Image (tube, rainbow, N blue to C red):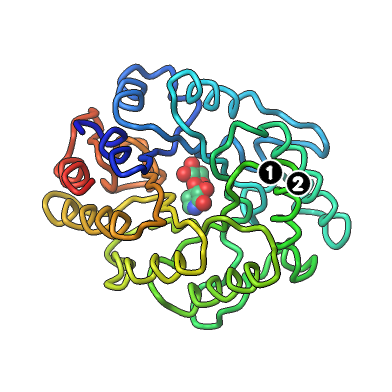
Amino acid sequence: GTTLGASAAESGRYFGTAVAANKLSDSTYVGILNREFNSVTPENEMKWDATEPSQNNFTFGNADRIVNHARANGMRVRGHALAWHSQQPGWAQSLSGSALRSAMVNHITRVATYYRGKIHSWDVVNEAFADGGSGARRDSNLQRTGNDWIEVAFRTARAADPDAKLCYNDYNTDGQNAKSNAVYAMVQDFKARGVPIDCVGFQSHFNPQSPVPSDYQANLQRFANLGVEVQITELDIEGSGQAQADNYGRVIRACLAVARCTGITVWGIRDSDSWRASGTPLLFDGSGNKKPAYTSTLNAL
Ligand code: XIL
């Protein structure tokens, strides 16, 4: 193939990007989006603060702009994210206990029902485990509602949209470590008990402090062996030139070597679109030109 999406499709995979609704009027941005990508993830527009700014008042305008663009152009949509400790509206941040649990369930039901049939994969729960060596859950208002909040979120999402693939998504789980071991144990437990989970997302935000792990492919494979899909969900890699290109190539080849690695999403199009305040972690430069990392990615697909 001559584009990322077409090349990924040759092996039955998708190649996606995070999209910001307010950039859909930028013709350079949209030109690259429509040419190269066949999946989109709303970068912020489906998060709790965006979709339920006051309790039980739902606003889908910006998310709909992205979903409509995707559907009009034959792209899949990854939904991101139904339950997360971050980017909660103020009213939810001030809830706790059963009131917060009920609000979470209502939020998942309403958002997943609204988009029922339009979402390829949902990040049902995002970033619920702690960094470091504890293997513990991250402390958060959601965690303090009870350890079962994650399975409740997945069961609620399944009931609302039975055809979407339901993913657990996290960072620093890209190699084998205490955090990914804890996620692995949770997925194993969910599969054993029949809690609905279909996929695990590996954010894959890499930089010199957190490089592509040497056991990246092995880690994807061990999760796949549990009977879930694995997806690379928010890929970006700090750096430039051939070193960055080589790292992108390693990530892409790892996914292609794992049969159940079904798709790759980069977290933005041009370096200037990146959530990173500085740096050049993406596949296109600020003018929209293809970087060496693009060529390496395309060649690896
Ligand atoms: C980031 C967005 O890119 C930023 O625009 C926003 O200010 C903060 O969130 N992990 C995730 C994503 O799951 O939702 C985050 O996106 C990046 C880290």
- Residue in view at x 66 percent, y 47 percent: 82
Q: Which residue is mark 1?
A: 162
For the C terminus, the quadrant is top left
- Residue 93 against residue 61 in the figure, above or below: below
Residue 141 position in % (x across, y down): 74, 62
Q: Secondary structure at mark 1?
A: loop
Residue farthest toward the right in the current orientation of the protein: 98
- Asked if ligand 1 lies within 8 A of label 1, the reply is no
Q: Secondary structure at mark 2?
A: helix
Residue 291, by quadrant, is: top left
Using the image as rendered, state which of residue 297 and residue 155 is in the foreground: 155
Q: In this rendering, would 250 be left or right of 147? A: left
Residue 98, by quadrant, is: bottom right
Q: Which mark is residue 159?
A: 2
Q: Amino acid at mark 1?
A: Pro
Residue 249 position in % (x across, y down): 20, 53
Q: Amino acid at mark 2?
A: Ala
Q: How many marks?
A: 2
- Residue in view at x 43 percent, y 35 percent: 39
Q: Are marks 2 and 1 in contact (CB under 8 Å)?
A: yes
